[in-house]
Amino acid sequence: MNLPKLRLISFKLCPFVQRTVITLLHKDVPYDIDYIDLNDPPEWFKELSPLGKVPVLQVDGKEVIFESAVIQEYVDEITPPPLQPEDPLLRAKNRAWISYGGEMIMKMHGMVTAKDAEAFNEASDAFAAMLARVNDVHSGSDYFNGDAFALIDAAYAPIFMRLDRLCQECGVTVLDLYPKLKRWSDNLLALPSVQHSVVEEFPMMYRKMLEKMDGYLATQLK
Ligand SMILES: N[C@@H](CCC(=O)N[C@@H](CS)C(=O)NCC(=O)O)C(=O)O
């Protein structure tokens, strides 16, 4: 297969970048990765990234694409067999729920930044309500659609990795409300493509980020 040269621009803690990396690893696609500090982005990144956000995927040293779900689909389309459902209706539904997963990532940030117990409980309840919606449409099998791993699984795995950190570091157990999703999370977190989708120091960096946020969760660190 004659693949274009792919260069991914990343920020080590970014869940949206992680969606892309899981897809690349799962499909065994060669790529280069450049890490930037989003708090102090280099000039070349400002010129390269249309919205100043990561992930950005540069193709053959020229064109760039952005938006994690779009990058996931592009990587999938250039490397058959597809990780998207064959049925157009199911594919469309998957796209919609992938988009919802992006909203969940933002909502999860509300738990991390909550300043006190009251704000945290509010954010946690709002996040639990989103989990409930996903729980309602999940197949109940190993993966979202059934027995086969799909792009939507790559899109949600970063959420579960962070929930796992929050559980281990601060005792956040919101996922336990949904055993079906907990099992999905366990399946995803056991995959090599998910385990290797973040840098080795990710757990330490995530903890440091919680400390830096200096919110309610920083007071709950074990
Ligand atoms: N909808 C975008 C979200 C990407 C995003 O928000 N990335 C964050 C890092 S996790 C970012 O680059 N933030 C910098 C900024 O908003 O200026 C996607 O799915 O790719």
Image (cartoon, rainbow, N blue to C red):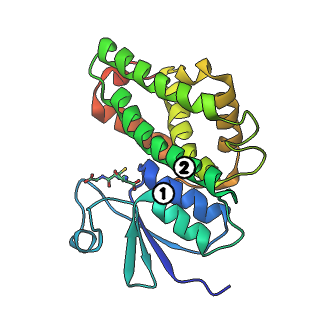
Report the front residue among 100 and 1. 100
Mark 1 and mark 2 lie on one chain; the one further toward the N terminus is 1
Q: Residue at x 35, y 38 (%)?
A: 209
Q: How far apart are the alpha carbons under marks 1 and 2? A: 8 Å
Q: Are marks 1 and 2 in contact (CB under 8 Å)?
A: yes
Quadrant containing the N terminus in the rendered view: bottom right
Q: Is 80 rendered above or below residue 211?
A: below
Q: Is 39 rendered above or below residue 104?
A: below
Left or right of residue 82, residue 109 in this image? left
* Secondary element type, mark 1: helix
Q: Residue furthest right?
A: 147
Q: Residue at x 66, y 53 (%)?
A: 150
Left or right of residue 66, residue 40 in this image? left
For disc 1, the marked residue is 69
**Circle 2: residue type:** Ala
* Disc 1 residue: CB within 8 Å of ligand 1: yes
Q: Is 201 rendered above or below residue 135?
A: below
Report the front residue among 152 and 123. 152
For disc 2, the marked residue is 155
Residue 121 drawn at (x, y percent)? 38, 15
Q: Residue at x 59, y 83 (%)?
A: 3
Give neighbour class at mark 2: few <14, some 14-19, many 20+ (Cα, 10 Å).
Answer: many
**Circle 1: residue type:** Ala
Q: Residue at x 56, y 55 (%)?
A: 197
